[in-house]
Amino acid sequence: MYMYTINKAKVKEAMDAAGIKTQTQLAQKIGITKNQLSLILSTKYTPLKTKFEEMCKVLEASPEYIIDFDNHLGKNSEPNLFIKPSEITAIELFAGAGGLALGLEQAGIRTLAHVEFNKYCCETLKTNRPKWNVICDDIANVSFKSYENMVDIVTGGFPCQAFSYAGKKLGFEDTRGTLFYQFARCIKETNPLMFMAENVRGLISHDEGRTLKTILSVFTEIGYDVQYKVLNSMEYGIPQKRERIVIIGVRDGVEFSYPQKARTIKTLRDALLNVPPSEGQSYSPAKKAVLDLVPPGCCWRSLPLEIQKSYMGKSFDSGGGRTGMARRISWDEPCLTLTCSPSQKQTERCHPSETRPFTVREYARIQTFPDDWSFCGGIGEKYKQIGNAVPVKLAKQLGRELIRAIKQYRETNITKAL
């Protein structure tokens, strides 16, 4: 985690140069108490020190002059650790491979901490953004109290877990032991203006709807107005049919609107134009022989009847959909939802022209990652990271709406204060 201290000797030099004789006098000029100034000058870690920028103005000294960076920062850390009043900041939980964080960065949001437990995901984040503050730990071990009232947004996609009801309506404390509880705890400890939670569409019907009902109830309990909407990525310029629920919580006075839908649909052809070569998995000879018979845009239903029965096994007699099995994607449609494994039988995603799964870079293109965003770990881990990610371009659009809502809130409150 980023840490820094203020060099008191340099503060004293700046005070002398400005004709300020005592810390009490300095505190008065900043507009704070002597105790508050003492906290700013203390060695106690606080990621963002209240009134720090104002103190720099009073002393006519740059932050770089009075901050002692070398004592605490690694060689890759950037010396811009204080927050400008105009900046919009976030903390991201369950950061994964960085799809959401990268999209928010592209929108203009500064994420102060990225919390992730998977070591390969952490390596991916650090490799692509060495200056990001990546906390690779179990979220239950991470305290967010030092960020209280210092971040605008908490974001993340907590895994969908059932709650133990025991015949009662659950509140915040009753959800302990779940990763949702940790997400809600971060919100309680930081008190942001907004939060954004992304999850699978199945959350709506999970446990007959009780899971989502409990989640919304807890968010309301801790002081937020909540709305949710299922977004299909293909309707927002992403070349993939991917439905996810996006839950937004806001404090009183903050107004959020979901992004407008795109006017055109992006296809797989658009996504994979000039895609760079990369590693990828392959099918077994038996599976390849079956998929060789499937035309683009079709699935197992296009196979000869006897091959259908052989390939589908017991699933053939159970009826229903299962159009993901033996599925070859068409060039002229968005890809089906990418999963954690491109060759898994229930969710096969065969290349349109070649009988093989998509490569790692093709997977990343479909999720709108830039070509220079690398993924760490073995090939199975890379597919998993990409398949679990929020599409970067969707995250960017959501980020722009978060920024719009916060800027509007700030402008409204400034007007009221005048």
Image (cartoon, rainbow, N blue to C red):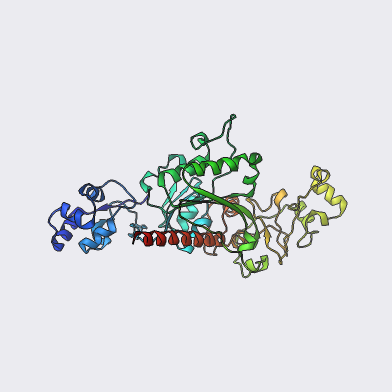
Q: Residue furthest bottom?
A: 274
Q: Nearer the viewer, residue 331 or 61?
A: 61
Quarter occupied by the C terminus: bottom left
Is residue 282 visible in the rendered structure shown here? yes
> Percent position (x, y) of residue 315?
79, 44
> Percent position (x, y) of residue 359?
63, 59
Up/down of 284 relative to 182, above or below: below
Q: Residue at x 80, y 48 (%)?
A: 311
In the image, is 84 to the left or to the right of 389? left
In the image, is 248 to the left or to the right of 28? right
Q: Nearer the viewer, residue 110 or 133?
A: 110
Q: Residue furthest top?
A: 166
Is residue 378 visible in the rendered structure shown here? no
> Percent position (x, y) of residue 147?
38, 48
Q: Nearer the viewer, residue 16 or 220?
A: 220
In the image, is 52 to the left or to the right of 170? left
The image quadrant of residue 108 is bottom left
Number of on-image labels: 0
Up/down of 45 relative to 357, above or below: above
Q: Residue at x 36, y 46 (%)?
A: 146
The image quadrant of residue 370 is bottom right
> Percent position (x, y) of residue 113?
42, 51
